Image (cartoon, rainbow, N blue to C red):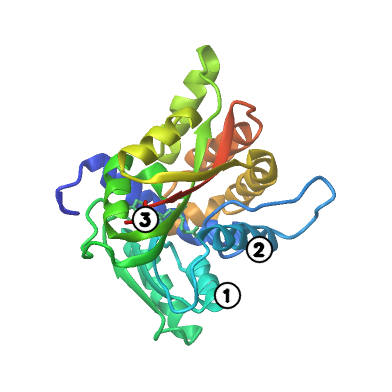
Amino acid sequence: MSVQEQSADYEAIIRQYEQLTDVSEVILGDNLHVGYWAGAGDDDSMQAATDRLTDLLIAKLDVRPGGRVLDVGCGTGRPAVRLARVRQVEIEGIDLGIHQVEKAVARVREEGLDDSIVIRHADAMELDYPEESFDGVWAVESLPHVPDRAQVLREIARVLRPGARLVFTICVELVPTTGEKREFLDNYYRTFNASYPPIESLPELIGQAGLEVVELMEIGEHVFSRTMAAVAKGFRDAADDLESSVGLSPQRTELMARSALAFGAMEETGYVVAVARRPSA
Ligand SMILES: C[S@@+](CC[C@H](N)C(=O)[O-])C[C@H]1O[C@@H](n2cnc3c(N)ncnc32)[C@H](O)[C@@H]1O
């Protein structure tokens, strides 16, 4: 399926991401993913915490200097820049949002990393790379938004070299929910154009792509409450700007802020760092 053939829902997901990218970057310290705090006494800034999550993923991906990495849903590129600097690897970053791609390209140029990072507008559903092209792939918070996670994972497995790792992060449902909580989650998914799988489905999802599970780390208690509190405050602070710049009504912004707060307080949801590998030949 080409980008043009995707459904209207899919278009909406991508458009929403483009619209919220600028405000999200401000809230999340220039990254587009959650922060990681060690515990209650850790009062690191949002940028330090979101970079710390990136550092955890860099360690889990464990690619050697000179290796080639695919960043699926690279957003505006801060994680890729950090990975390239820390590990001296070559990176291909792809994203379906034109706005994110433009910002990522500008960032890479400003950082003087044109020789090691290439950013492209492309769809994770159909990777146009030959088999066994990469020594590592990561997908940081991009899988909640793709129309078919199994298809994307199969594509990733295809382009990984034997023995190479995939690291992805995703919010999950820790336990089945019913009643009001189920209704809240379904509404949340509609509000944020996302869906989160049950945690117990991850091994099968990874396995059906032909990958082996190395590790599944559930780190919700380290990421959610502070990230979601900051997201809610950030949306509220930016409500006027969001209305004038991208036409988001104040009511919609308030709905997003409240939803983020309520989601951050839920015990039934978690955040998983998944580490998988393509079996060695
Ligand atoms: C939460 S952001 C994370 C960005 C970046 N990985 C980071 O951690 O800063 C998710 C990104 O995935 C991108 N995305 C969603 N669906 C995609 C797809 N099918 N192909 C490529 N990118 C996609 C979105 O456009 C968005 O920029």
Among the 4 quarters of the image, the one containing residue 257 = top right
**Drawn side of residue 194 relative to residue 151, left or right:** right
Q: Position of residue 211 (x, y in %)?
A: 36, 46
Q: Position of residue 137 (x, y in %)?
A: 40, 60
Please give the residue where the numbered disc 2 appears in the rendered image. Answer: 47
N-term-proximal mark, 2 vs 3: 2
- Tell me: is circle 1 under 8 Å from ligand 1: no
Please give the residue where the numbered disc 1 appears in the rendered image. Answer: 86
Which residue is drawn at the image coordinates 76% and 59% (left, top)? 44
Q: Is residue 274 above or below residue 24?
A: above
Neighbours of disc 1 within 10 Å: few (<14), some (14-19), many (20+): few
| Foreground pick, 242 / 186 | 186
Which residue is drawn at the image coordinates 30% and 69% (left, top)? 120
Q: Secondary structure at mark 1?
A: helix
N-term-proximal mark, 1 vs 2: 2
Q: Is residue 278 above or below residue 271?
A: below
Among the 4 quarters of the image, the one containing residue 50 = bottom right
Task: State whether residue 175 appears in this view.
Answer: yes
Pair 2/3: label in front: 3
Which quadrant of the figure shows ligand 1? bottom left
**Drawn side of residue 233 relative to residue 168, left or right:** right
Neighbours of disc 3 within 10 Å: few (<14), some (14-19), many (20+): few
Please give the residue where the numbered disc 3 appears in the rendered image. Answer: 280
* Amino acid beneath label 3: Ser
Q: Secondary structure at mark 3?
A: loop
Which residue is drawn at the image coordinates 57% and 65% (left, top)? 30
Distance of mark 2 from mark 3, alpha carbons? 37 Å
Q: Secondary structure at mark 2?
A: helix
* Amino acid beneath label 1: Val
Neighbours of disc 2 within 10 Å: few (<14), some (14-19), many (20+): some
